[in-house]
Image: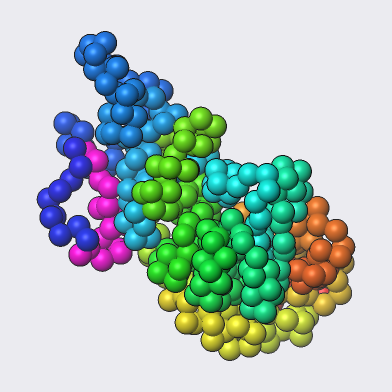
Amino acid sequence: MVDTAHSALDAWRPRTRLVRGGLNRSQHMETAEAMYMTSGYVYRSAEEAEAAFAQPRNDRYVYSRFRNPTVASFEERLRLIEGAEACRGTTTGMSAVFASLMCQVRAGDRVVAARALFGSCLWICTDYLPKMGVEVEIVDGTELAQWRRALSKPTKAVLLESPSNPMLEIVDLRAVAALAHDAGACVIVDNVFATGLLQRPLDMGADIIVYSTTKHIDGQGRALGGAILCTEKFLADTLGPYLRHTGPTMSPFNAWLMLKGLETLDLRLRAHCSSARTVAKALSRHPAVERVLYPGLLTHPQHKLAASQMKDFGSVVTFTIRGGKEGAFKALNGLRIIDISNNLGDSKSLICHPATTTHQRLSPEEKKLAGIEPGVVRLSVGLEDPDDLIEDLTRTLDSV
């Protein structure tokens, strides 16, 4: 049963929703959410089975590819945090991005996307969608003039990240959403770097939010997952049938881990943001570092815009090391605490070289346009003592 001890659910503050939202106790009244590791469900009669399949959107579970109690608890909790009408969990963040696009676009449609996207997202836009007969226009997400020009034509969907991966570009969400809606477009925002605690794109005009829940929501490197947040109507008419028949379903075990991750998300994010700001300031003073990008620094080219859209500035710091790829590799190889890994949002600090990992498949021209230079590294600041992280970075940068 859903815990309704507090009738004023909508009045709960975010930290309470992170712990209590979507709590679905069984008849055993367990403290932690139960994990329903089942593929199917039974019926008391053939008539009950017929009725369940005749109304697949009701609360009756029929098959875990469609809905599952543990996954539903996670979806409800995340929905409450985001202020969305509906949420669906998916296998990965990329399946969330792909489903949010493919459920609604078809040959002859038009999509506008920001250039500053995760490598696989950019591949979907520049390689896959055109093969399906979808016209795609790529713009510089920070330039409103380019958005205005691209959205002067009828458009089906807009895809963007803010802050972007890995260069932490900030898109003016309100302005782009207004332009997109005038063009008839559905606005999809990848909010993974900020999470719903630091930024609420739905309040600024976005129609769909997508997540890799693998990042901050799990936050401990344990499980893959994704999520799509949208309106009830979009879920019923467009997204729901696509998910039902294509099957990018989040597993109950992963959903249970995400539920546990949400309980501590607020506490972890506060520490992530505080440490990231401290580390960014220290990096900006090191002579081996050419440039530091962190939205919370006054030196970030879009600091004011970031401050108008975000409550805090996240866990990721991107910086350029002198000496290009050779200097970056030497610095990364000398680290003793920070791990080389392409994940982010983890309790452990992780660092990577985007040009040779997450964005390796981009052409040299595409990397240049995206600002991904040979010396650029992306640091996801974890929950270690920031002074230890600064000492680790300083020691290895001193050798560059």
Residue 173 vertical placement versus 158 (above, below): below
Magenta highlight range = 11-25
Quadrant location of residue 257? top left
19 left or right of 244 in image? left
**Which residue extends farthest top?**
46
Name the foreground residue: 219 vs 70.
70
Residue at x-position 63% and y-position 68%: 151
Residue 110 image position (x, y, % from top left): 66, 55
Residue 3 image position (x, y, % from top left): 18, 45
Q: Is residue 270 visible?
A: yes
Residue 217 vertical placement versus 239 (above, below): below
Q: Quadrant of the C terminus?
A: bottom right
Total marks placed: 0
Name the foreground residue: 342 vs 92.
92
The answer to whether residue 182 is magenta is no
Residue at x-position 86% and y-position 74%: 323
Quadrant location of residue 115? bottom right
